[in-house]
Each structure stands twice: as C-alpha cells, then as structure tokens.
Image (tube, rainbow, N blue to C red):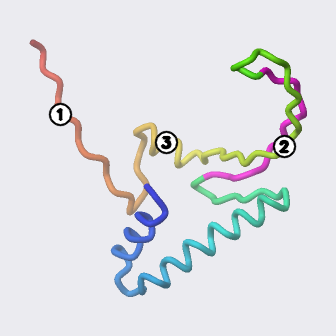
Amino acid sequence: MTRSELIAQLAAENPHLRHSDVEAIVTTIFEEITATLSEGRRVELRGFGAFSVKRRDPRTGRNPRTGESVEVSGKAVPFFKPGKELREVVNGGPPQAGAPKPPARPAKTKA
C-alpha cells in the first residue's frame, strides 16, 4: 500500500473527515516518527510495533564488480520490530476487533 492509497482508504472509511485533513494527519504522523528517529529515540506503537535506530559499525567491504576492498563508514539505519498482535494477525492468528477478515481460501480436493 502506498502513502496515497493509505490516505484514500482512511478518507473513505471516515467520511466525516475531509481528504485534506486525513492527508495532514498521515503526513504529521510520518514526520513525527521521522523526527524522533533522527534524534536517535525510539517510537513505540502498542499493538503494532516499535521503530528504532540501529548503529552499523564501520567495516571493510568489497566492490562486487572489481573485487577491491572498500572502506564502508559507520551509519545509522531505521529498524522496525513488529508487536505481538501484528505478528499474530500476519501469521493467521485471531484478528483484532474491527480488522477486516482475510478472504477464505478454497478447500483443497484430492485428485
């Protein structure tokens, strides 16, 4: 799902909100998550998961084209750890209240 699809779906599910208001809400949430991570802090959304920043140490890499050794500098990378409820739903566990049910799979028949 893309950002614009998310905004369109939320606007359709909440007809009492204008499309521009939904877009502002989604943009604000993403900007706040980004700003918090850029400060090196963690964002936890209960029932969904946690965003954090992990540090990668500098290392010696290899150029795949030439085979030469290349120094790769250290960096910070965003990391997402899903929450228990999200993992259960993704793995076919009990859906949360209000969540859409996945389509039923046809039964397999023996040939």
Q: Write down the residue under mark 3.
A: 88
Q: Nearer the viewer, mark 2 or mark 1?
A: 2
Q: Residues within 10 Å of mark 2 (few under 14, many from 20)?
A: few
Q: Residue at x 72, y 48 (%)?
A: 78
The answer for how far apart the CA atoms under marks 2 and 3 are is 32 Å
Task: Locate residue 85, reporting x and y percent.
Answer: 53, 48
Q: Judging from the image, what secondary structure is the residue with disc 1 in?
A: loop
- State yes or no: residue 75 in magenta: no
Q: Residues within 10 Å of mark 3 (few under 14, many from 20)?
A: some
Q: Write down the residue under mark 1.
A: 106
Q: Residue at x 69, y 58 (%)?
A: 44
Image quarter where the C terminus lies is top left
Q: Nearer the viewer, mark 2 or mark 3?
A: 2
Task: Locate residue 104, reporting x and y percent.
Answer: 23, 42
How many marks do you count on the picture?
3
- State yes or no: residue 55 in magenta: yes
Image quarter where the N terminus lies is bottom left
Query: Residue 75, located in which quarter of the rendered image?
Result: top right
CB contact under 8 Å: marks 2 and 1: no
Q: Residues within 10 Å of mark 1 (few under 14, many from 20)?
A: few
Q: Write down the residue under mark 2.
A: 75
Q: Judging from the image, what secondary structure is the residue with disc 3 in?
A: helix
Residue type (three-letter) at the residue carrying disc 1: Pro
Q: Which residues are magenta?
A: 49-62
Q: Residue at x 38, y 87 (%)?
A: 16
Residue type (three-letter) at the residue carrying disc 3: Glu
